[in-house]
Amino acid sequence: MSAPNKSYDPVEVEALKPEQIERMRDEALAAFAAADSLDALHEAKVAHTGPTSPLALANREIGALPPHAKADAGKRVGQARGAVNKGLAARQAELEAERDARVLVEEAVDVTLPYDRVPAGARHPLTTMMERVADVFVSMGYEIAEGPEVEAEWFNFDALNFGPDHPARQMQDTFFVQTASNSGSAAGKGADSDGESGVVLRTHTSPVQARAMLDREPPVYVVCPGRVFRTDELDATHTPVFHQIELLAVDEGLTMADLKGTLDHMVQSLFGADMKTRLRPNYFPFTEPSAEMDMLCYVCKGESVGNPDRSCRTCSSEGWIELGGCGMVNPRVLTACGVDPEKYSGFAFGFGIERMLMFRHNVEDMRDMVEGDVRFTRPFGMEI
Ligand code: PHE
């Protein structure tokens, strides 16, 4: 700031000359007019109204003027600054209005549009059913065990006491998998086509029994849900890919009574307290003795049997619904899996989830389960 100077004449101070002040004002107004965004306007504002702007610097010179000149110069600068501030405010309002109009367009929400109707999705009823069954056993202290879907033939058959000529190994039941090591025979044919690759798509969840016993020391209590494969055509009652749930218990002193009690507990948990199961003799290479297990029909509770007035669609008036296979683990299987059959015994059972879904929910065609049509899934609820 200049020092006070009595003989100071404002006309002589260059920055305070009227035409200079007018120029500063006009430059400021031109800069505001040229600013095409609020950011640009802010820059122009700093340059033309800030503490180092020409008008602010000119204003400072006033203090150094003699009193008689101060008023004149002060008025001039004050008017110019007033005009600049007004111009700034006007341009600011203009640009803000433009921005608001743009934002309204860009961020417009059409509340009349339909809401997002794409459902978040749901797990397949087979998955939900499998988990529901597995949960029954988890709550009893069983552990979930899983095994590969592409399985060694040894686990799928040999370890489970299937003889080398057991018919289930044949092509009509089992998908053999071509592997890199067997794909280039001299005849140019994959050995898999002869069923000799040694690798299969597992035909049941029972190989997980063998894996579970080899993986752990007894006692073993595992439940094994999973996908299995057989060379069936897809039709109303067959599918080449389906799901099973397997149970294995190995401990000291387990008997068929433990198996029966466990089965009863399972059907009571799933279908109601007045449910029970029955066993019918059967044969499986990996259990001895073996049984087919039936559960009481949960709809008619057996009352439809021999009672034409009360026929039951769910069990075809047979009173019982066939569920799956079970038995005491064959000592040869225990031995093959490193468990001493003198000390331990075990029980196992396995059944198909598709079948259970069919009778529990009156699904009449298995193809509905694989076609992926949400009209099938939706009534089961969106359990995510
Ligand atoms: N794995 C047998 C099947 O697929 C079922 C089963 C499991 C039988 C466990 C006995 C014990 O038919």
Image (cartoon, rainbow, N blue to C red):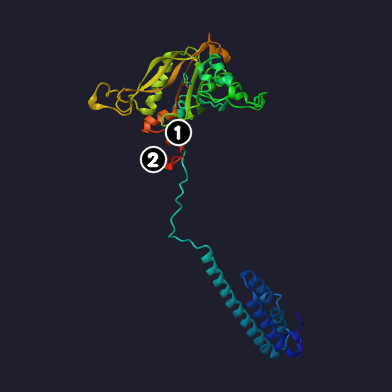
Image: 247 above or below 363: above
Image: 309 above or below 43: above
Displayed quadrant of residue 15:
bottom right
Q: Amino acid at mark 1?
A: Leu
Residue 216 seen from this side = no
Q: Residue at x 46, y 28 (%)?
A: 134
Left or right of residue 32, residue 108 in this image: left
Residue 231 seen from this side = yes
Q: Amino acid at mark 2?
A: Pro
Image: 75 above or below 115: below
Q: Which label sits on residue 275?
A: none
Residues 231 and 37: in front is 231
Disc 1 element: helix
Which residue sits furthest left?
A: 309
Disc 2 element: helix
Q: CA distance from mark 1 to mark 2?
A: 13 Å
Q: Which residue is mark 2?
A: 379
Displayed quadrant of residue 236:
top left
**For the image shown, how many numbered marks are present on the structure?**
2
Q: Position of residue 160 (x, y in %)?
A: 53, 16
Left or right of residue 28, residue 156 in this image: left
Q: Residues within 10 Å of mark 2 (few under 14, many from 20)?
A: few
Disc 1 CB within 8 Å of nearest ligand 1 atom: no
Left or right of residue 82, residue 248 in this image: left
Residues 133 and 356: in front is 356
Q: Which label sits on residue 126?
A: 1
Q: Position of residue 234 (x, y in %)?
A: 46, 31
Q: Residues within 10 Å of mark 1 (few under 14, many from 20)?
A: some
Image: 13 above or below 98: below
Q: Residue at x 49, y 18 (%)?
A: 249
Residues 263 and 219: in front is 263
Disc 2 CB within 8 Å of nearest ligand 1 atom: no
